[in-house]
Amino acid sequence: MSSFPVTRLRRLRRTGALRDLVRETSLSLDDLVMPLFVAPEALPNERLPGLVRHTVDSLVRECDELVSLGITAVLLFGIPEEKDEEGSGAWVEDGIVQQALRELRPRFPELLLLTDVCLCEYTSHGHCGVLVDGEVDNDASLDLIARTAVSHVEAGADAVCPSDMMDGRVAAIREQLPQAPVIAYSAKYASAFYGPFRDVAGSAPSHGDRRGYQMDPGNVREALRECELDVAEGADMIMVKPALPYLDVVRAVRDRFDLPLGAYNVSGEYAMVKAAAAAGDLDERAAAVETLTSIRRAGADIVFTYWAKELAQWRS
Ligand code: PBG
């Protein structure tokens, strides 16, 4: 019989209560944010239930259900009726996200309403900024990004989440909105795992890719520099995205910065597990809990995940 303390603890952990007592990482609904898509027309998605398009009406019903399940925060993405070169649907007063916010705000005073601030769902070319001579122009995009953030806050958003990765966008937003919390997607990688999202949002770039403004998957020190810039520009919370292939980045950012840290368990990470579960290769619920726990263990305070609703249902 071994008398090593770790072994003794492991033996004791066979009882559920002690296992819970000594678990180092918790996973609670309070730590999760549910992303939601709103569009002029609904688009169901049997295969990936977290990735459906709601209308404003069905979004209100969905939030009602989410709140009763114990979800405390949502992140809104909009898909406009029409896209154009500049992405004007992102900031117009009657834009889809602005309409949704005006309906949700008075109905759900306690629900945290976060908005994704980016142009890619609104531009006809699908890039996250405006094009000048066929290339994304960083500085010309900043004004439009800031304008979008202002319109979200005016419509009732609690905090804005710039995901465009233009340099200087946190400062541009901060200048216009000295008081609003800014949750910056600071280390956002040019990832293959955004596939299902781009299908739902209709935001795949029509030419080229996002490597000019999103990060190279090989880099971690660069992620720290990106975070440093966003913190200096006034971000209140920083984010790493995707999560699973970048858990080392989550850990490195956690160790370096004191601000609250989010990680985005993106659409492809969700779809992979769904597909494997549908094929009978693994148990979805266990794999989802393990996935989200690993992201928390790596150091994320908050996890953005399409599983938030299903997790709440499984637990209720
Ligand atoms: C918008 C944005 C994207 C995601 C979140 N915000 C797509 C992209 O950069 O192409 C992806 C989220 C996901 O895959 O779940 N810029």
Image (tube, rainbow, N blue to C red):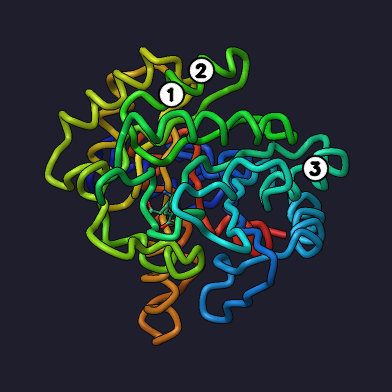
Q: Specify which label sits upstream in the sequence, 1 or 3.
A: 3
Q: Amino acid at mark 3?
A: Arg
* Left-right relation of 306 to 217: right
Separation of residues labelled 1 and 3 (CA atoms): 24 Å
Q: Nearer the viewer, residue 69 or 25?
A: 69
Q: Quadrant of residue 214?
A: top left
- Other-residue count near label 3 (Cα within 10 Å), few / some / many at <14 / 14–19 / ≥20: some
Q: Amino acid at mark 2?
A: Arg
| 1 and 2 marks in contact (CB < 8 Å) | yes
Q: Position of residue 103 (x, y in %)?
A: 82, 47
Q: Label 3, on which residue?
A: 102
Quadrant where the C terminus sits is: bottom right
Q: Nearer the viewer, residue 250 or 283?
A: 250
Q: Position of residue 10 (x, y in %)?
A: 36, 47
Residue at 25%, 39% (x, y): give it: 3
151 up-or-down from 266: above or below: above
Residue at 68%, 34% (x, y): give it: 157
SS state under label 3: helix
Q: Amino acid at mark 1?
A: Val
Q: Label 2, on which residue?
A: 174
